[in-house]
Image: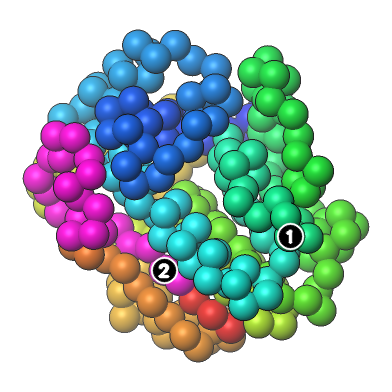
Amino acid sequence: MKPNESSRTALIPARQRAAHQLLDHGSILFDPFAIKILREDEKDVLQFANFHPMASIGRLLTAARSRIAEDALSEAVARGVRQIVILGAGLDAFALRSPYDALEIRIYEVDHPATQAWKRQCMAEAQLALPPWLIFVPVDFERDDLGEMLAGAGFQRNSPAFFTWLGVVPYLTREATGSTLDYMASIQSSEVVFDYMEPPQSFSEEMRELVTEQTEELEKMGERWVSSFEPAGIRSFLRAHGFREIEDVDFQEITSRFGRAVQGLSPGQAGLHVVHAKH
């Protein structure tokens, strides 16, 4: 993304979350703030949702990966985790609907300064107050040290933490992904949920066409997908960076678990995965 400019790719999952509320009634992920924080007209959200015949798959994946992350987070909180870090938060509204307000939970949202300024503006326009447990951590990933910035915001490195890292890894080099995993693994009893893409040949022909179109659109915005992993490779990659317990949920499993909840789900094979890994 360009300096001093908010991430335009953050709009895509925000619109998909909003469309999931309108078209699927939030059946996978109920989020009453998804439409409010987006600050777009419902008809525009629906136009986006119906723009491409395969768009329903994106809606499914966006809702499902958040649901998988939040289910895993619920178990972590029950085990005593009190620090949550949302990397690349965009317009994610989990902090606004967190069910843990009775606990001493701290939610650290990490994103580019310009994207966070945009989010603050959206929240102000929607008259959404910042909850006391939410801490914004502006990080320029090209220049800043993630650990230093989190520590400066009050994050306790010697206490357990749960990281969500959704819609980010495909935009990072393997080196950047690995260094971030190294930092997470340096934290006691840490765990993370993130998503990744397989190489294009694992997609159906229809999905490959959509990926090609999206790649062209990303390039116009000055962004691009730069990494992919084979499922066997992601396991060895995670183990090499300190993670031992690994659950890899592939597209078939996502469709089996959640597909019925998405209106008009298009057929197609997507090489997309959601991983839950524990240190």
| Residue at (54, 80) in percent of width and height | 278
Q: Let me know if residue 44 is in the magenta part.
A: no
- Residue 212 versus residue 109 in the image, above or below: above
- The magenta stretch is 254-276
Cα gap from disc 1 to disc 2, whole angstroms: 26 Å
Residue nearer the viewer, 254 or 229: 254
Residue found at the far front of this picture? 102
Q: Give the amino acid at mark 2.
A: Val
- In the rendered view of the protein, which quadrant contains the N terminus? top right
Secondary structure under the numbered disc 2 in the rendered image = strand
Mark 1 or mark 2: whose residue is earlier in sequence: 1
Instruction: Give the side of residue 181 with respect to residue 68, left or right.
Output: right
Q: Tally the marks.
A: 2
Q: Give the amino acid at mark 1.
A: Leu
Q: Residue 75: percent from the left, percent from the top?
A: 53, 71
Q: Residues within 10 Å of mark 2 (few under 14, many from 20)?
A: many
Q: Let me know if residue 266 is in the magenta part.
A: yes
Q: Residue 35: percent from the left, percent from the top?
A: 48, 24
| Residue at (41, 60) in percent of width and height | 68
Residue nearer the viewer, 222 or 14: 14
Q: Which quadrant of the figure has residue 121?
A: top right
Residue nearer the viewer, 165 or 221: 165
Q: Residue 223: percent from the left, percent from the top?
A: 49, 38
Residue under numbered circle 2: 275
Secondary structure under the numbered disc 1 in the rendered image = loop
- In the rendered view of the protein, which quadrant contains the C terminus? bottom right
User: Residue 187, which numbered label?
Assistant: none
Residue under numbered circle 1: 103
Instruction: Give the side of residue 148 with respect to residue 119, left or right.
Output: right
